[in-house]
Image (spheres, grey):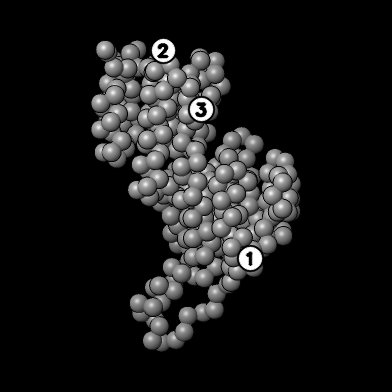
């Protein structure tokens, strides 16, 4: 039986690439972009990641495309309207990365509030000259969660163990016993820390901008575990440089991995290399779910985690 042609747009660990190569005729576009014109007419499936998505020229070159399988939860970089119009299925890998993303969000908040990164450097040198400055307590802190999907709920679950006063913004109130604040500006105003876990789409683009940052204030912390597009990065940099907020923990950036050099000059940030789901356990689960979606599609079976 002829294997379906699968266009691979990003690299994966060997534990994913080996079974993909066994099940499909894999064409590694990320290694040789020049093959697109020749192979495009035969492509039936695309394997990509959430940050990369599928460029318009790739869609155009693949007239027989049936499915886009995303290695990740975000699908904002895939043109869903185009996929619906062409009858292309889209899948992602939700749930399996929720716990790791929530862990990193809480970890960044702890690192910010307790100055963990700076304290580690202090212990290696200046400690003998004097004590490290006093920091901030997370237990009992007022925390706002912007977007209460799977990851936001997991963050709330963890912070409830710290006795935090939790509130959230979402499209509608949920029956969870937490305080609902519809307006992100009002949520920021009542928060010592604001954690961004919302979906990235046209509605949430730059949802954290000058007004939200001003409401968070000079004592407030910002943590972003969502997408870079949810934050007005220029406004954030200006607030961090001027002391408009106390600090930020960031796992995502515009133009990554090419960070704005202004971030590197700041001492009130905790910067992470977009690795919220970066554990062996989660990446194996993500790969398995991506392959399960591809296998189900070509077997004519229901998709385990369909977006479209």
Mark 3 crowdedness (10 Å alpha carbons): few <14, some 14-19, many ≥20? some
* Front one among 143 and 273: 143
Tag on residue 63?
Answer: 2
Residue 245: x percent and y percent?
61, 62
Tell me the element at label 2: loop
Residue 259: x percent and y percent?
43, 50
Tell me the element at label 1: loop
Residue 241: x percent and y percent?
55, 62
Depth check, mark 1 against mark 2: the one in front is: 1
**At 57% across and 53% down in the image, what residue appears?**
155
53 left or right, relative to 196: left
Q: How many marks?
A: 3
| Residue 109 quadrant | bottom right
Tag on residue 163?
Answer: 1
Quadrant where the N terminus sits is top left
* Front one among 197 and 29: 197
79 above or below 257? Answer: above
Residue 235: x percent and y percent?
60, 52
Q: Mark 3 points at which residue?
A: 306
Spatial CA span between label 3 and label 2: 21 Å
């Amino acid at each position: 039986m002829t294997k379906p042609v699968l266009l691979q747009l990003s690299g994966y660990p060997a534990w994913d690439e080996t079974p993909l190569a066994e099940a499909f005729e894999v064409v590694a576009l990320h290694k040789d972009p020049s093959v697109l014109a020749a192979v495009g007419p035969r492509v039936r499936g695309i394997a990509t990641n959430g940050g990369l998505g599928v460029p318009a020229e790739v869609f155009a070159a693949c007239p027989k495309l049936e499915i886009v399988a995303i290695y990740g939860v975000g699908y904002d970089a895939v043109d869903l309207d185009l996929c619906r119009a062409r009858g292309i299925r889209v899948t992602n890998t939700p749930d399996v990365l929720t716990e790791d993303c929530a862990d990193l969000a809480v970890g960044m908040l702890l690192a910010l509030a307790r100055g963990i990164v700076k304290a580690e450097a202090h212990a290696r040198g200046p400690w003998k000259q004097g004590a490290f400055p006093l920091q901030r307590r997370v237990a009992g802190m007022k925390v706002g969660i912007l977007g209460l999907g799977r990851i936001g709920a997991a963050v709330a679950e963890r912070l409830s163990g710290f006795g935090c006063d939790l509130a959230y913004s979402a499209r509608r109130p949920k029956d969870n016993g937490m305080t609902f604040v519809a307006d992100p500006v009002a949520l920021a105003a009542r928060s010592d820390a604001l954690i961004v876990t919302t979906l990235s789409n046209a509605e949430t683009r730059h949802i954290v901008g000058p007004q939200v940052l001003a409401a968070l204030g000079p004592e407030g912390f910002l943590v972003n575990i969502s997408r870079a597009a949810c934050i007005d990065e220029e406004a954030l940099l200006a607030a961090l440089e001027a002391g408009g907020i106390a600090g930020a923990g960031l796992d995502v950036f515009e133009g990554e991995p090419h960070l704005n050099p202004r971030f590197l000059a700041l001492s009130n940030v905790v910067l992470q290399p977009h690795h919220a789901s970066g554990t062996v356990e989660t990446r194996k689960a993500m790969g398995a779910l991506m392959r399960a979606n591809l296998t189900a599609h070509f077997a004519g079976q229901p998709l385990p985690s369909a977006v479209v």
